[in-house]
């Protein structure tokens, strides 16, 4: 069971949920975070303070005042208007990864959503309701607005509750209208409140999920490359001197040293290494730690960025205290 609260989600967590259906819950800290931010939002709603996306329009309509009675429909309209992606559907594992990342982002406690929003995302994950999300239409670092809106269509509704406005989802091997998939899974679709549409579709969540899965797979490929190198050295009776850790320690490149250590571990006790009596091997063998090490360093650099992003508050605006709300994303 993975517990989320917006601070310690790791790449391996994304993979186990996306690919292995690991169950997820909101931690007590996450619940506190969500409820605190929701209280701050309600304080804003009780005032006439204009705040972007809460009681104003979006984009060029940011100077338009929105009444409290219209704010729910504003949230729903935002989702409907941005669910305009195209192209082949993203793989289910990417969508599931994005659902987890979005839930974690909201559990960080700066978006002002109700707990039910986060819990519904997790309930869908555990029930196996996976929105069908077109692969084209994201704005990248400016936000996966289109993909996230297709996700939100399935879990949200409005007074009209039209099936054609519920998107599509896969459930138990079948592709259904979102409304039907949620009903078959016995999950309730939610009427969005103020700001909740913006909280669901504003952020680079799909990009982060794709990145997390890619980093995980790249790490595995790097490990396979180390095994392949070790087997090649055995087959060619390679020279072990090139992997002496002293050589790589004084080079002070972390990835290079890691690869050299791995090769030493994999070939320890070999009866074939150094069997050919060569002074040194071909460049492709003796300098493999330098080459593969640079790849490892690049993968780990990407991993650091991705792990920060899957724990980031990416909404706009963000709530920091009862009347301290900042718009800058």
Image: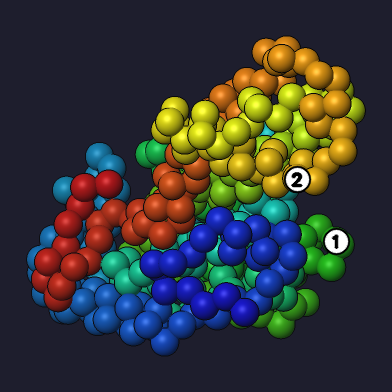
Residue 220 appears in the picture as rendered: no
**Quadrant, the N terminus:** bottom right
Give the number of the disc on residue 174. 1
Instruction: Label 2: state its secondary structure.
Output: loop
Residue 28 as seen in the image, left or right of residue 101 = left
Residue 319 as seen in the image, left or right of residue 11 = left
Q: Position of residue 282 (x, y in %)?
A: 73, 12
At 42% from the left and 51% from the top, the residue drawn is 309
Q: Where is residue 102 in the image (x, y as percent from the top left)?
A: 48, 61
Instruction: Label 1: state its secondary structure.
Output: strand
Viewer-proximal residue, 279 or 202?
279
Viewer-proximal residue, 262 or 211?
262
Viewer-proximal residue, 21 or 190?
21
Give the number of the disc on residue 268. 2
Front tag of 1 and 2: 2
Quadrant hosting residue 186 = bottom right
């Amino acid at each position: 069971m993975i517990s989320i609260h917006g601070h310690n989600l790791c790449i391996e967590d994304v993979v186990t949920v996306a690919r292995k259906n690991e169950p997820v819950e909101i931690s007590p800290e996450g619940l506190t975070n969500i409820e605190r931010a929701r209280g701050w939002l309600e304080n804003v709603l009780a005032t006439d303070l204009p705040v972007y996306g809460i009681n104003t329009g979006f984009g060029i309509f940011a100077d338009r005042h929105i009444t409290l009675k219209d704010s729910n429909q504003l949230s729903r309209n935002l989702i409907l208007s941005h669910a305009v992606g195209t192209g082949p559907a993203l793989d289910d594992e990417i969508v599931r990864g994005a659902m987890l990342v979005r839930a974690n982002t909201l559990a960080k406690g700066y978006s002002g959503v109700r707990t039910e929003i986060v819990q519904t995302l997790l309930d869908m994950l555990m029930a196996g309701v996976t929105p069908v999300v077109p692969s084209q239409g994201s704005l990248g670092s400016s936000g996966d607005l289109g993909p996230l809106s297709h996700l939100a269509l399935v879990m949200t509704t409005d007074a009209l509750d039209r099936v054609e406005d519920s998107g599509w989802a896969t459930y138990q091997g079948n592709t259904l209208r979102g409304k039907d998939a949620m009903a078959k899974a016995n999950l309730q679709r939610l009427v969005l409140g103020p700001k909740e549409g913006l909280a669901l579709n504003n952020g680079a969540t799909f990009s982060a999920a794709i990145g997390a899965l890619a980093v995980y797979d790249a790490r595995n490929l790097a490990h396979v490359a180390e095994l392949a190198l070790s087997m090649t050295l055995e087959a060619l009776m390679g020279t072990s001197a090139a992997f002496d850790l002293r050589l790589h320690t004084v080079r002070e490149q972390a990835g290079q040293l890691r690869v050299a250590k791995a090769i030493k571990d994999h070939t320890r006790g070999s009866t074939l290494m150094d069997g050919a009596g060569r002074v040194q091997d071909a460049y492709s063998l003796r300098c493999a730690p330098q080459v593969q090490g640079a790849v490892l360093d690049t993968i780990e650099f990407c991993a650091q960025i991705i792990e920060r992003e899957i724990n980031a508050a990416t909404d706009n605006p963000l709530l920091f205290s009862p009347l301290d709300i900042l718009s800058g994303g």
